[in-house]
Image: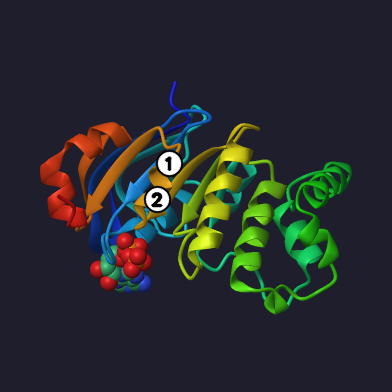
Amino acid sequence: MALLQVSSLSCGYHSLNVLHDIHLDVEPGQQVVLLGANGAGKTTLLKCLIGLIPTSSGHIMFAGQDITEWPPSERVKGGLAYLSEVGVIASLSVEDNLNIGGYYLSRQERRQQLQRLFEQLPLLYEKRKDPAGSLSGGQRKILGFAKVLMGKPQLILMDEPSSGLAPVMVNEMISMLKTYRSSGPAFLIAEQNIKFLEGTDDVYVLDNGQIRFHGTPNDLDADAHVKAAYFGLN
Ligand SMILES: Nc1ncnc2c1ncn2[C@@H]1O[C@H](COP(=O)(O)OP(=O)(O)OP(=O)(O)O)[C@@H](O)[C@H]1O
């Protein structure tokens, strides 16, 4: 059974639908990429899935439950996490940001998870008392990633992890995804950067609020029409 199953979903802002009839699945442990240009509706879809924007029609099933009407806090408690492009609170310390990510864990679990992440990401341990705003853009992205991992989610919704990152940090982010995928969570990643197709199981192409393509990265690579129409590739 799919971990996330989105069917006939429409949503938008102030009674104006931006997304139309979206169907999308994520299986446990999968990495799924949602590709689309600026304004295609990627952020809107992720916000709708986490509950920050209400659904106009359709259904969102997660871990066997219909969460379409659930508030964001219940979705997070249920194992869904959302990492926005910003991802961290600049005025709070690195450690406080991480503890916010583990808000729904018991005190003991939170302590253990914090220790585990500090061991895996020594940079965050070194900077644990520093305000998140003092970190470089790349370090902030890593902190944002660690912050969502703190809550031990089953599925992480990531909004443009590459935005504002130098190419070397994009590679670092891709290798972090590889590392953490093997330890459990599934990922739905909204991106414009096709580098994120590396290690990806499934791809959806979103254009003007509609899914125009769904398949594996190999299927996408073989589809000259989609490549030319949406990515200017021959
Ligand atoms: N708060 C809002 N109120 C009204 N319309 C909005 C709002 N936010 C986004 N939109 C519109 O919804 C459409 C989809 O925007 P969205 O931000 O979801 O796209 P995106 O694919 O994430 O693009 P980007 O990469 O630029 O963030 C756009 O036409 C945008 O102008």
* Residue annotated with mark 2: 195
Residue at x 58%, y 64% (from the top left corner): 87
Q: Crowding at label 1, few (<14), some or many (≥20) Cα neighbours within 10 Å?
A: few
Q: Where residue 77 sits: x, y (%)?
A: 64, 44
Amino acid type, callout 1: Glu
Tell me if I can see residue 149 in this picture.
Answer: yes
* Residue annotated with mark 1: 198
Q: Nearer the viewer, residue 122 or 37?
A: 122
Amino acid type, callout 2: Lys
Tell me if I can see residue 13 in this picture.
Answer: no
Q: Nearer the viewer, residue 22 or 213?
A: 213
Residues tagged 2 and 1 counted as in contact (Cβ below 8 A)? yes
Up the image or down, 103 lies above or below 6; here it is below
Q: Give the structural element (helix, strand or loop) at label 2.
A: helix
Q: Tell me where residue 106 sits by quadrant.
A: top right
C-alpha separation, residue under disc 2 versus residue under disc 1: 6 Å
**Quarter containing ligand 1?**
bottom left
Residue 29 is left or right of residue 180, and the answer is left
Residue at x 50%, y 41% (from the top left corner): 187
Mark seen at residue 72: none
Q: Crowding at label 2, few (<14), some or many (≥20) Cα neighbours within 10 Å?
A: few
Q: Nearer the viewer, residue 40 or 47?
A: 40
Q: Where residue 151 sits: x, y (%)?
A: 69, 46
Q: Tell me where residue 53 sits by quadrant.
A: bottom left
Q: Where residue 202 sits: x, y (%)?
A: 36, 34
Q: Give the structural element (helix, strand or loop) at label 1.
A: loop
Q: Where residue 159 sits: x, y (%)?
A: 46, 58
* The N terminus, quarter of image: top left
